[in-house]
Image (cartoon, rainbow, N blue to C red):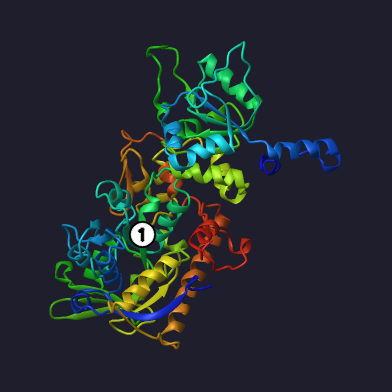
């Protein structure tokens, strides 16, 4: 299962004009969290919010739609969202916390829920996890370096960053500059090289741009909780749907990219095992499905 | 239930032909009786016992219907001395590290190993030494008491449940797993028996240095003393605050990865 277990795969976008304007693609993470907050499915959410520094996100506990919307849009650098989960439950007193996670964070979250060894009464307060598709992540200095060196853009002038059509896009007030995504290789953090998960396989609902046309997201509904929340949001008109294109730029591309991330990671995992370096995953020879996230 | 655990742990590794009819009957008899549990308190703060009792909703049926607490100073008011020998136990939870200079603790721990089928290092003091690792003696009530070590340094341990304290949920989940003979769930706890030299610096040595850190922040979240913060997406450990409980590294998704259990729990 290259895309993990899921109940539904579809294109989706938020119907809220304001969210459409500020979010990355279809505004699914922002739209679903705002909807869940309005419906009291969650009473707050851990998101990658703004910090004092432009484009450097900070894990933030958002308690209102405004605060959720302030965190809209992708930041291509590290935001240790798991760090704020205990804070959200203890300091902010959330009983039903939402959280946005990239695949590795989803894995930290789910491990904590199945084995809450040192984490007291936090696991049961997680009401909704929105997973984001992720190919790799960049240290903040890496991001700054290739934006200024490859795109030749003053970091402070960047208005939006995006990855799509094989390119890294940098938008400023009066310009749209791009360079091949290949040129970012070597800048990513090395922990990503053993990651077998592109599509947040363990989230309640996962969302991403791969396989979706502009301004839409490709969404996978995975768990029972995810299904309930997603269907409510669709029924209420907060999210609109469109079938995903099965072809080359749709499902096929998502499948291909997920498979290629997994294959690359498995090579690295096997190489590490041979060298005797630690890695928490099984070697390809040790598992039935060599691409499974185990 | 216990027969299954013992069999799995190789504690009753007698060849099949030796298992006489009598022995089979004995095991069957044992299955019907409630497991006898002991709680042994060595050098710890009672936080682990407190965490156990935080399972209010399951505690009463657990203590009265599912198990017999046959030994323990806090939970059962049973003390061991020369006139009252320590009873036989199926499972002993040991809280606290053991002080090598404390004859009483050493004697009690060795006796527990004799009398208990399964010994659990319960809480980080017993499992990793935790904050008692910092002891240097020279204090009242006994200035000679300076060397506190995880119990696995002295006796064979079957399961380790670290945590400062272990959360009430992990205790409940483990109890349920033990009663159901769910060895898959217990496997990580068996593996953790060998993790006795824990430190916040394991995040650096075993994760960042090994090119495995992805900056998710799970370590910083799980630290019970807020010794771990995240700087530029990497854990930073304040060693003055670290109590060496091991929880940060144990919760890290890159230390061990229980994929099957997670999929099962999520219904995926």
In front of the other: A253 or B123: B123
Q: Residue at x 24, y 56 (%)?
A: A60
- Residue closest to the eye, A191 or A102: A102
* Marked residue chain, label 1: A
The N terminus of chain B lies in which quarter of the figure? top right
Tell me how many marks there are.
1
Tell me residue B87's x, y (percent). 64, 23
- Asked which secondary structure carries label 1, the reply is strand
The residue carrying pointer 1 sits among few (fewer than 14), some (14 to 19) or many (20 or more) residues within 10 Å by Cα, namely many
User: With respect to residue B228, does A250 lie above or below?
Assistant: below
Instruction: Please say whether residue B253 is visible from this viewpoint.
Output: no
Residue drawn where x is 63% and y is 35% of the image: B35
How far across and how far down the image is residue A37, in percent? Answer: 26, 64
Q: Quadrant of residue B6?
A: top right
Task: Tell me which residue sits at (50%, 54%) in the image.
Answer: B257
Q: Quadrant of residue A127?
A: bottom left
- In this view, B75 is above or below A94: above
- Is B267 on the left or on the right of B35, as rendered? left
Asked whether B141 or A14 is in front, the reply is: A14
Q: Position of residue A135 (x, y in %)?
A: 39, 70
Whether residue B223 is visible here, answered yes or no, is yes
Residue sitting at x 29%, y 52%: A84
Percent x, y of residue A201: 45, 67
User: Does residue A188 lie above or below B183 as drawn?
Assistant: below
Left or right: A165 in relation to A155:
right
Where does label 1 land, which residue?
A127
* Pick the front one: B117 or B60: B60
């Amino acid at each position: 299962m290259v895309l993990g277990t899921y109940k539904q795969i579809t294109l989706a976008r938020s119907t809220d004009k304001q969210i459409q304007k500020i979010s990355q693609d279809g505004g699914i993470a922002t739209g679903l969290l705002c909807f869940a907050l309005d419906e009291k499915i969650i009473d707050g959410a851990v998101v990658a919010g703004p910090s004092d520094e432009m484009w450097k996100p900070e894990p933030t506990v958002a308690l209102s739609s405004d605060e959720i919307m302030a965190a809209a849009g992708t930041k291509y650098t590290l935001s240790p969202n798991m760090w704020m989960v205990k804070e959200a439950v203890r300091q902010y007193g959330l009983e039903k916390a939402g959280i946005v996670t990239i695949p590795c964070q989803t894995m930290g979250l789910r491990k904590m829920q199945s084995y809450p060894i040192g984490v007291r009464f936090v696991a049961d307060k997680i009401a909704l996890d929105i997973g984001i598709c992720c190919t790799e992540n960049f240290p903040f200095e890496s991001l700054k370096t290739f934006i200024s060196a490859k795109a030749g853009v003053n970091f402070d002038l960047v208005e939006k960053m995006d990855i799509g059509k094989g390119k890294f896009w940098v938008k400023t007030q009066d310009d749209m500059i791009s360079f091949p995504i290949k040129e970012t290789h070597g800048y990513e953090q090395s922990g990503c090289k053993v990651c077998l998960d592109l599509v947040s396989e363990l989230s309640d609902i996962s969302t991403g741009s791969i396989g979706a046309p502009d301004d839409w997201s490709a969404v996978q509904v995975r768990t029972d909780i995810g299904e309930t929340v997603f269907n409510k949001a669709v029924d209420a008109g907060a999210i609109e749907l469109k079938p995903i294109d099965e072809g080359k730029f749709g499902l096929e591309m998502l499948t291909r990219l997920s498979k290629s991330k997994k294959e690359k990671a498995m090579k690295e995992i096997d190489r590490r095992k041979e060298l005797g370096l630690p890695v928490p995953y099984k070697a390809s020879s040790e598992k039935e499905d060599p691409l499974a996230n185990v | 239930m216990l027969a299954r655990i013992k069999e799995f742990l190789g504690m009753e590794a007698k060849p099949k032909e030796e298992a006489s009819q009598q022995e089979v009957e004995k095991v069957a008899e044992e299955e019907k009786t409630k497991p006898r549990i002991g709680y042994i308190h060595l050098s710890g703060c009672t936080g682990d016992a407190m965490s156990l009792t935080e399972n209010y909703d399951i505690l009463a049926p657990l203590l009265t219907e599912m198990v017999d607490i046959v030994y323990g100073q806090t939970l059962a008011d049973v003390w061991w001395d020369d006139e009252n020998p320590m009873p036989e136990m199926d499972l002993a939870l040991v809280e606290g590290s053991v002080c090598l200079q404390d004859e009483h603790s050493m004697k009690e721990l060795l006796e527990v190993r004799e009398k208990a089928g399964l010994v659990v290092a319960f809480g980080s003091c017993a499992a990793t030494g935790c904050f008692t690792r910092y002891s240097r003696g020279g204090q009242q009530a006994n200035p000679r008491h300076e060397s506190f070590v995880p119990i696995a340094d002295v006796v064979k341990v079957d399961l380790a449940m670290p945590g400062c304290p272990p959360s009430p949920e992990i205790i409940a989940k483990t109890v349920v797993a033990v009663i159901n003979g769910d060895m898959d769930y217990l496997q990580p706890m068996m593996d953790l028996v060998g993790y006795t030299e824990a430190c916040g610096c394991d995040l650096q040595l075993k994760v960042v240095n090994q090119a495995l850190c992805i900056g998710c922040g799970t370590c910083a979240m799980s630290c019970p003393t807020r010794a771990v913060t995240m700087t530029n997406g990497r854990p930073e450990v304040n060693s003055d605050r670290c109590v060496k409980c091991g929880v940060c590294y144990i919760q890290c998704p890159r230390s061990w990865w229980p994929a099957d259990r997670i999929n099962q729990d999520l219904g995926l």
